[in-house]
Amino acid sequence: MIDQRDALWNFSFNTYYDVFFQELIAEEVIKKLQKEDYYNTILIATASAASFLLGLKFWDDGIGRVIWILIAGFLAFLSIRFPLLKIQERLINWIDVREYFTVLRIELETLRQQMAVDPNFSIEDFSVRYDQHRSAYKLGMRKLKDDPLITENLKKKIESRLNYFLKDEILN
């Protein structure tokens, strides 16, 4: 029969792992969204400046006017596409998700450290605290939204990185 303290230790590790995983996923999505936002901003600014300069220089030239119309059309496409991606909205959401899971991970680390310091910890008290963290984890999972940036490859990458970080605990 498994000791209740050992069971609580194992359950808390599983929740800690899941929380840490979600935190790292959010971190990667944030990096990708920030990069996409940066490149879109640079692209729009560069194309706008080029369009303006070409319009000034070549407006009276037939080919210049065609080039300007193409660049203006491209800018119109970007200006329509950019809001459709909802990058800013997604970024705000994922930052909130990351912060939520970071706080929860630290709280679970604290709980597990307190359990390790006192191997005769009160099962009842720590079970209540663990249940509170588990409920918070469930709430955090409700904050998650499907995002095309979360691919199976990303999940595998994060899982490998997390397994490397926690290899000592996983082996025990």
Image: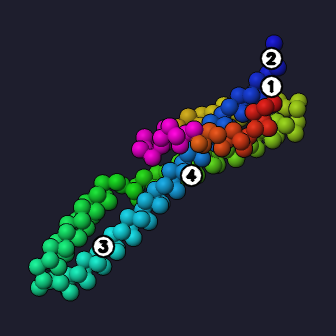
The answer to whether residue 9 is left or right of residue 24 is right
Residue range corresponding to the magenta coloring: 142-156
> Residue at the spot x=19%, y=74% of the render?
67
- At label 3, the amino acid type is Ala
Few, some or many residues within 10 Å of mark 2 (<14, 14–19, 20+): few
Determine which residue is flagged by label 2: 2
Determine which residue is flagged by label 4: 27
Q: Work out whether mark 1 precedes mark 3 in sequence or the reverse, and give the earlier one.
A: 1
> Residue at the spot x=63%, y=49% of the render?
102
Task: Mark yes or no: residue 140 visible.
Answer: no
Distance of mark 3 from mark 2, alpha carbons?
66 Å
Distance of mark 1 from mark 3, alpha carbons?
61 Å
Report x, y in % for residue 129.
Answer: 71, 35
Few, some or many residues within 10 Å of mark 1 (<14, 14–19, 20+): few
Report x, y in % for residue 62.
Answer: 11, 79
Distance of mark 1 from mark 2, alpha carbons?
7 Å
Q: Work out whether mark 3 precedes mark 2 in sequence or the reverse, and give the earlier one.
A: 2
Determine which residue is flagged by label 1: 6
The answer to whether residue 48 is left or right of residue 26 is left
**Magenta-span inclusion, residue 105:** no
- At label 1, the amino acid type is Asp
Distance of mark 4 from mark 1, alpha carbons?
31 Å
Query: Tag 1's secondary structure?
Result: helix
Q: How many marks?
A: 4
Dividing the picture into quarters, in which one does residue 53 lie? bottom left
Determine which residue is flagged by label 3: 47
> Residue at the spot x=32%, y=60% of the render?
82
The answer to whether residue 153 is left or right of residue 119 is left
